[in-house]
Amino acid sequence: MYSGPILKLRTELKSVIEYELPIGEELVGMNKFIGKYIHFEWKNEILCISCGRKTNKSFAQGYCYPCFLNSPETSECILRPELCEAHEGKARDMKWAKNHCLQPHYVYLAVSSGIKVGITRYSQIPTRWIDQGASFAIKIAETPNRFISGIIEVALKEFVSDRTAWQKMLKNQVLEEFDLIEKKHELFSKLNSNLQKFKVEDDKITEINYPVLEFPKKVKSIGFDKFNEIAGRIMGIKGQYLIFDDNTVLNIRKHNGYVIEMKL
Ligand SMILES: [Zn+2]
């Protein structure tokens, strides 16, 4: 039995993704539980992942309300990079912004169901792709900060989605015919000339395989706010979701900071 606050699944890119669940002080390898029956119980407690205080409600996937309002991790530019002002010396916390917003970022294309564009800090590759449940991904631009990546993403949103269709992703309804390299160059040709210099020349495609025995035909999301106990046979893990044998799926990341007891 394991018990304590959980954090989003840690991942490692191998021929099949390896997942670990941080719970309390432990890091539990999850791949070995696939095909097995597992039982989770929420202990009606949430601990803010920034300040550690108890909170009745979780904001932005794990923060108490004061931290949601003030902590740099929940700045507006996290969801809307094009609004980042760190390069002008403005941020909730400049020290944090230096280590995050003012670091190299990548714009990428990923295929989780259809093709989507996204951005992430250089060190978050391939983590970000795996968290989204992407099957394939390619870097398209490398920029010196978050803001410029955001500008490129906004420009490309006109031609390609920036959303993950999570239900299709979980059902493994992945686009069959596509050419990511061709798409990359096609999209890039539509950018303003002042953005052309950020293009990544390397056309390497990363392929990602998830530990799933059988994908669900339908998908129903469940969470601890509605059900204190969640149990079932785990059929697989994809993105940040555990997939159970009754077509229910549990988004682990959404429950950052929830105090959980887990047993077989
Ligand atoms: Zn807090």
Image (cartoon, rainbow, N blue to C red):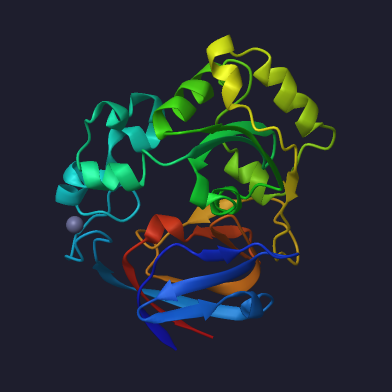
Is the N terminus in the top left, top right, bottom left or bottom right quadrant? bottom left
The residue positioned 69% from the left and 34% from the top of the image is: 114
Q: Quadrant of residue 138?
A: top right
**Residue closest to the eye, 29 or 2:** 29
- Location of residue 136 in the rendering, given as x and y in whole percent from the top left corner: 72, 45
The residue positioned 61% from the left and 35% from the top of the image is: 108
Is the residue 32 above or below the residue 211 in the image?
below
Is the C terminus in the top left, top right, bottom left or bottom right quadrant? bottom right
- Please say whether residue 163 is visible from this viewpoint: no
**Position of residue 77 in the picture relative to residue 208 (left or right):** left
The residue positioned 51% from the left and 36% from the top of the image is: 119
Q: Quadrant of residue 100?
A: top left
- Location of residue 4 in the rendering, given as x and y in whole percent from the top left corner: 33, 78
- Location of residue 13 in the rendering, given as x and y in whole percent from the top left corner: 65, 62
- Location of residue 43 in the rendering, given as x and y in whole percent from the top left corner: 30, 75
Is the residue 171 above or below the residue 249 in the image?
above
**Residue closest to the eye, 81 or 86:** 86
